[in-house]
Amino acid sequence: MAVILEFKCPLCGGSYAPDAVQYTCPTCGTVGTLDVLYDYAALRSQIDRDAIHQHPAQSIERYKALLPLKPESALPPLRVGMTPLYDSARLAEHLGVRQAWAKDDGQNPTGSFKDRASALVVARAVEQGIQTVSTASTGNAAAALSGLGASVGLNIIIFVPASAPEAKIAQLLVYGATVILVEDTYDVAFDLCTEMCLREGWYCRNTAMNPFTTEGKKTASLEIADQLGWDVPDVVVVSVGDGNIIAGIYKGFYDLHQLGWIPRIPRLIGVQAEGSAALHQAWQAGQSAAEMQPIDAQTLADSISAGLPRDRAKALRAVRETNGAYVTVNDEAIIAAIPRLARLTGIFAEPASAAVFAGAERAVQSGVIHRDERVLLMLTGNGLKDVRRAQQSVAQGLRVKPTIESIQQALGSERNK
Ligand SMILES: *Cc1c(COP(=O)(O)O)cnc(C)c1O
Ligand SMILES: [Zn+2]
């Protein structure tokens, strides 16, 4: 219901009327992913945070007043957002920080944080009478678009690297999407998808390129503030591939800060896989987004594999403006983090999500996170998304003959290990 004031480019500062551009900055090209900005003074006089806090909906429907939708437009029927936020003393003690929360976005309808972006893009598509929406994805954005698209009967066309985990590909096919398995990387699939959207007139949900992806993802921050009674954490840790999630988290807190509903924006810490750390490198070198060059991304955490992060401008800004940091973790640490996180919190996370836990440990050890800080781990994807990697992180079960002796024997030798 929020009326868009302007689209603004974070690189050149160019301001565009809401109907003047559809995707990225005409001056900067694809690196100029746009911010969707509002008349915050007007919003402040129309809505108050108590009304939102008391909203009966247990989904992102609660935040419709802060989303770029017409009053008569509806979000898709699936229940996106309002994911659990666990205040975990065990996690805080383990990390060695004052307080720690885990927010489990693996509980979204298609199993990942990406549902937030797809819910808004699908709502915008329906609002504009669009029939076909397409995206490139390493898997989760595709599942999110396919599931949310199916819930309102849209035609969905997906471009994924043929190497995406089987379970993720199966999910797309089950939702009835047209699935194009590109025999190349995610980056190549992304460019092909963009090209086909422009040629065929499909609406393109590609991460960051479509400015509404960030607007959907910002709901995570609105939720964090809402769930904590507007007393935000000191630090939010999130894993980063293309940088659209960290950009969305920044944008949600930015909106709340502009409205005067929170006193400050938490420090944002981005976790990258060591073999896919373009943003970490640029941040350390003090490079601008425009200067960044593609790297050869290699990581088992498929959801955070990105050679040239699409939302690099906003992802660098999110960390620089909040006095945050980028940290890296290697694949071995990421896989090992899956059972370690699960045994500490009861949350089963996919590799890219478990990486946040490994990254938070690393950030505390290196002094990037201070021991007196209150830290939130944003867990982005469900462990069932990639069972094959999870299996690599644990021992086998105890195989027994169907007798009591055999069970006792197996348990005995397990204890003696
Ligand atoms: C997409 C994704 C990320 C990273 O988000 P970016 O916007 O690409 O930085 C992290 N974790 C999971 C589970 C994801 O699906
Ligand atoms: Zn620009």
Image: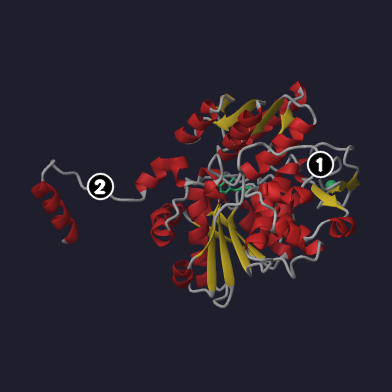
Q: Nearer the viewer, residue 286 or 72?
A: 72
Q: Residue at x 70, y 35 (%)?
A: 122
Q: Is mark 2 within 8 Å of ligand 1?
A: no
Mark number, residue 71: 1
Provide the residue designation for mark 2: 397
Q: Is mark 1 within 8 Å of ligand 1?
A: no
Question: Does residue 366 appear in the picture of this structure?
Answer: no
Q: Is residue 59 left or right of residue 353?
A: right
- Check disc 1 and report its element: helix, strand or loop: loop
Question: Does residue 90 appear in the picture of this structure?
Answer: yes
Q: Position of residue 272 (x, y in %)?
A: 56, 54
Q: Position of residue 5 (x, y in %)?
A: 89, 48
- Give the answer, above or below, for where 209 lies relative to 203: below
- Image quadrant holding the C terminus, namely bottom left
- Check disc 2 and report its element: helix, strand or loop: loop
The number of numbered discs placed on residues in the rendered structure image is: 2
Sequence-wise first label, 2 or 1: 1
- The figure's colour scheme reads secondary structure
Q: Position of residue 226 (x, y in %)?
A: 67, 60
- Give the answer, above or below, for where 55 lies relative to 133: below
Q: Is residue 16 left or right of residue 255?
A: right
